[in-house]
Amino acid sequence: MENRDKETMKRMIRAAGLRATAARVATLELLQKVASPVTHADVAKHLAQIGVNQATAFRNLNDLNEAGIVRRAELGDHVWRFELITDGKHRRNTHPHFLCVDCGSVSCLPEIDLTESGFESAGKIREVTEVLLRGHCHQCE
């Protein structure tokens, strides 16, 4: 993903119809730095350093999600995780994630090719919105 500076982030937030607050910009800066989706608690801890409370952090994450800047995913463990949507990707075009069933770590995986004919033969699938693989990571051997 391209590295965005603060001014670019502010313009992106404003273009989505939101106010470019310090908390929203700091949220995007964090999401740009991390390699995998982060929880609300992770974002709230980061934003607490600039005096933002947990409720505001959560509201901002949801606003950014609704605006199509941030993607929200629940990976089967009842915890919402958030990630910055990469350039040229709509919020519904997602990439697969790997969830370690031992330590709970989440990793982004490169996009995989799932064929339409495979979905058509299943007969019950209209649209795939998330692909999640579960297993054991190398750290948990």
Image (tube, rainbow, N blue to C red):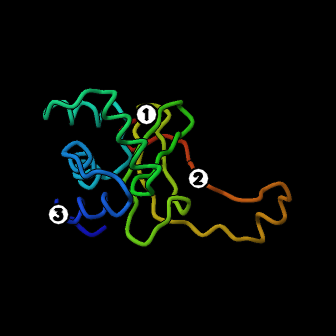
Q: Work out whether residue 76 or residue 22 is closer to the camera in this orientation and state it.
A: 22
Q: Residue at (22%, 66%) from the top-left corner?
A: 8
Eye-nearest disc, 2 or 1: 2
Q: Residue at (21%, 35%) from the top-left corner?
A: 47
Q: Earlier in the sequence, mark 1 or mark 3?
A: 3
Q: Work out whether residue 140 or residue 54 is closer to the camera in this orientation and state it.
A: 54
What residue sits right under mark 1 in the picture?
104
Q: Residue at (25%, 27%) from the top-left corner?
A: 53
Eye-nearest disc, 1 or 3: 3
Under circle 3, the secondary element is: helix
Image height of 127 relative to 99, above or below: below
Quadrant for the C terminus in the image: top left
Image height of 10 relative to 22, above or below: below
Residue lying furthest left in this view? 50
What residue sits right under mark 2 in the picture?
130
Q: Work out whether residue 34 or residue 11 is closer to the camera in this orientation and state it.
A: 11
Label 2 vs label 1: CA separation?
18 Å
Q: Residues within 10 Å of mark 3 (few under 14, many from 20)?
A: few
